[in-house]
Amino acid sequence: MEKTKTSVKLVECAILIAMAFVLSFIKIIDMPFGGSVTAASMAPIIVAGYRHGLKWGIVTGFAYSLLQLLMGLSNLSYATSAMAGIAIVMLDYIGAFTVLGLLGIFKRNRHQTGVLVIGTVVVCVIRLICHVIVGCTVWAGVSIPTVGGAIYSLVYNAAYMIPETVVTVYVIALISNAVDLKLDRPVTRKKSDNIMAVLNGVLIFGIAIVTDFLYLFQRIQSSDGFDITRISGANWGIVSIITFAGAAVGIIVYIITKIFVKKKQNQK
């Protein structure tokens, strides 16, 4: 019986890894120096951790990181030393994607949607930190300026990781609202109107974040290609206005959705 359960977990995790790998090729935006906004490619690995625990989550994340490393081996040719190459492997790939399995700490927690959303944000922040460290060390002087490298690395990596996080959180919440992942065999469940209202609001905010991304992405383009130092000349006032406007409209949409749902329920 135990062997059967292990086999089922192995097959399920393999399928989720394959799903994540395929989704990683569906890129909404691809950054010039690495990094991209994908079709929620991190979601399957996060689900694997939540369903099967920390050990399986870490193993699944690690296996996925090896696939990502395989696809990014060409980046190692830019490493200026053996230590730089090791840093790229361990942080840009192994560390950055293995951490997605950390959500296994909350294995089948009864507050499914809450822990999945919060956990997703946490692992995405950890992944961002991994990329920032590599950016301000290994890539400083290569694709990122040496002076102020930490700031440039943070801005560059956040420019794609924030939209990627928003997309992943939205998809994870959508899945959680429709499927009970706590069971051995996931089943559909009654959708929460409250969560749907939140998702509508988050969607609007997500559009604002992606708009910010596109603006910043445009700022680092020059006649000679991409120049990350140009981002310092971006109009951060516009970025702030778009962000706050997106948040405000998102809240309004949430309230309107709640009112509409309540009115519909009263009519029944």
Image: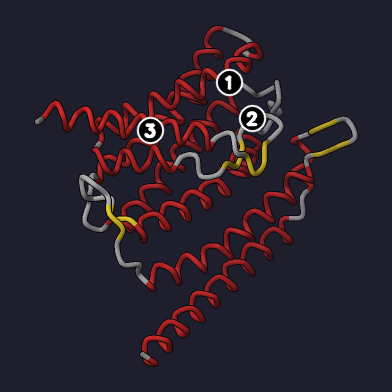
Vertical order, 239 against 35 (above or below): below
> Label 3: which residue?
15
Q: Crowdedness of circle 3 by 10 Å Cα count: few (<14), some, many (20+)?
A: some
Secondary structure at numbered mark 2: loop
- Using the rendered view, name the quadrant where residue 18 is placed: top left
Secondary structure at numbered mark 1: loop
Q: Position of residue 247 (x, y in %)?
A: 57, 67
Q: Outermost residue, left direction? A: 1
Task: Give the mark nearest the N terminus, 1 or 3.
Answer: 3
Vertical order, 215 against 245 (above or below): above
Q: Which amino acid does label 1 sit on?
A: Gly
- Using the rendered view, name the quadrant where residue 98 is placed: top left
Q: Which amino acid does label 3 sit on?
A: Ile
Q: Compute the Cα span from label 1 to label 3.
A: 22 Å
Q: Look at the numbered discs 1 and 2 and tell me whether their residues touch, using CB distance below 8 Å.
A: yes
Q: Crowdedness of circle 2 by 10 Å Cα count: few (<14), some, many (20+)?
A: few
Secondary structure at numbered mark 3: helix
Vertical order, 7 against 233 (above or below): above
In this orientation, which residue lies closer to the viewer: 151 or 142? 142
Q: Position of residue 13 (x, y in %)?
A: 33, 32
> Label 2: which residue?
34
Question: Who's the residue at 81% across and 39% down the image?
Answer: 221
In this orientation, which residue lies closer to the viewer: 211 or 88? 211
Horizontal side, residue 137 vs residue 141: left or right:
left
Q: In which quarter of the image is the N terminus?
A: top left
The circle drawn on residue 72 is 1
Total numbered labels placed on residues in the image: 3
Q: Where is residue 100 in the image (x, y as percent from the top left)?
A: 39, 36
Q: Which amino acid does label 2 sit on?
A: Gly
